[in-house]
Amino acid sequence: MPTNAQFGPPAPQDDGTRQLLQWGSSIVAAGVVAGVLLETVLGGYTRTGAHTNAGWFALIVVLGCVPFGGMLLALGVAKWLRNRRIAQGREER
């Protein structure tokens, strides 16, 4: 059974940046959609919480998806900027 060491390091195009950007943006989008639904369709929320059971579920989705997706998206953007800087450094040589 071959190991990863036999094939060398992964190609620079496949370092996970694209996946981080895709998943981070889709998770943030799911949180935003849940927030919009919470405000418009599911009765909104007040200081004490949501007004319906589905509203509570949407609130939990928002509070889970937006921070986690935001971290994934921030990491993806940071990796994309780093890869771009490295590629520009290679072109200058």
Image (spheres, rainbow, N blue to C red):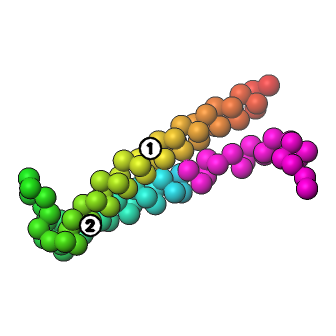
Residue at horizontal 59 percent and vertical 39 percent from the top: 79
Crowdedness near tag 1: few (<14), some (14–19) or many (≥20) residues, C-alpha within 10 Å? some
Q: Earlier in the sequence, mark 1 or mark 2?
A: 2
Residue at horizontal 86 percent and vertical 42 percent from the top: 5
Name the spot of residue 66 as percent of width and height, x first.
35, 52
Tell me, yes or no, whether the highlighted magenta stretch contains residue 31: no
In the figure, residue 53 lies in which quadrant? bottom left
Residue at horizontal 11 percent and vertical 68 percent from the top: 51
Q: Is residue 14 visible?
A: yes
Q: Amino acid at mark 2?
A: Phe
- Seen in the picture, residue 87 relative to 42 is either above or below; the reply is above
Residue at horizontal 53 percent and vertical 51 percent from the top: 21
Q: Amino acid at mark 1?
A: Met
Tell me, yes or no, whether the highlighted magenta stretch contains residue 16: yes
Q: Is residue 32 visible?
A: no
Q: Residue furthest left?
A: 47
Q: Is residue 86 left or right of residue 32?
A: right
Name the spot of residue 50 as percent of width and height, x first.
14, 63
Q: Which residue is mark 2?
A: 57
Name the one closer to the observer, 14 or 7: 7
SS label for mark 1: helix
Crowdedness near tag 2: few (<14), some (14–19) or many (≥20) residues, C-alpha within 10 Å? some
The stretch of residues the image draws in magenta is: 1-20
Could you tell me how far apart the alpha carbons at marks 1 and 2 are, in whole angstroms? 22 Å
As drawn, the label of residue 13 is: none
- Quarter of the picture containing the N terminus is bottom right
Name the spot of residue 68 as percent of width and height, x first.
41, 49
Q: Which residue is mark 1?
A: 71
